Image (tube, rainbow, N blue to C red):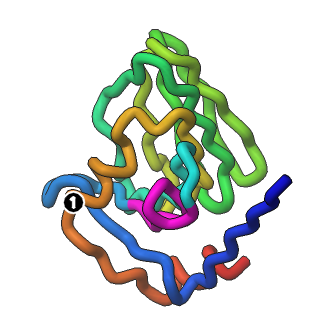
Amino acid sequence: MMHAVTKRPVSEVEAFRIAPADSNYFALLLDRQAGGTEAVCVVEIFTVGGRTPPNTHAAADEFFYVLSGTGVARCDGREVSLKRGDALLVRPGSEHVIENTGESKLYTLTVMTPNEGFAELIRAGEPVRLDAEDLAVLCG
């Protein structure tokens, strides 16, 4: 039986904004291309006032763990507040929006499984340079 471990230092992490007008961007930790996994693991970074567009996933669970900042999640008509240390799981088929309601960036460890083309969508976006605050959060 073969065991595989993938380790990626923060210096190898690429970041992307899906569309030029988006107020969130992604530090891509692991996916099929970087790590050979069908899950997509990112640190999602929301600028002040930033939010995702309303979206759903046909078969994927999407997990958010708040690393820093505050926000709200709106899912199927329900709203819950988010703060550091909170975990949120969005089930397939649920329309959802994550929004930064704080006065600083909101950072979430976001994992989607299965991929459903999410990694490819991120990688097709425009590259973003991570700033000192982003790197500090990524490095813990």
Q: Is residue 104 something one can see in this rendering?
A: no
Residue 51 sits in which quadrant?
A: top left
Task: Answer left or right for 136 relative to 104.
Answer: right
Q: Which quarter of the rendered picture does the C terminus lie within?
A: bottom right
Residue 138 sits in which quadrant?
A: bottom right
Task: Answer left or right for 10 relative to 23.
Answer: right
Most extreme residue toward the front is 1
Give the vertical position of 65 relative to 87 (above or below).
Answer: below
In x, y percent, where is residue 31?
Answer: 50, 56
Residue 67 sits in which quadrant?
A: bottom right
The answer to whether residue 48 is magenta is: no
User: Which range of residues does the magenta coloring cover?
Assistant: 26-35
Few, some or many residues within 10 Å of mark 1 (<14, 14–19, 20+): some
Depth check, front residue: 56 or 115:
115
Give the vertical position of 24 relative to 87 (above or below).
Answer: below
In x, y percent, where is residue 20?
Answer: 14, 60
- Residue that appears at 74% across and 43% down: 86
Q: Is residue 32 something one can see in this rendering?
A: yes
- Residue that appears at 38% across and 71% down: 15
In x, y percent, where is residue 60?
Answer: 51, 26
Give the vertical position of 39 relative to 34 (above or below).
Answer: above
- Residue that appears at 37% across and 43% down: 118
The answer to whether residue 33 is magenta is: yes
Q: Secondary structure at mark 1?
A: loop
Q: How many numbered circles are shown?
A: 1
Most extreme residue toward the right is 1
* Type of amino acid at the residue the image marks with label 1: Gly
Give the vertical position of 132 relative to 20 (above or below).
Answer: below
Q: Kindly identify which residue carries mark 1.
A: 125
- Residue that appears at 48% across and 24% down: 74
Task: Answer left or right for 123 relative to 6.
Answer: left
Depth check, front residue: 67 or 121:
121
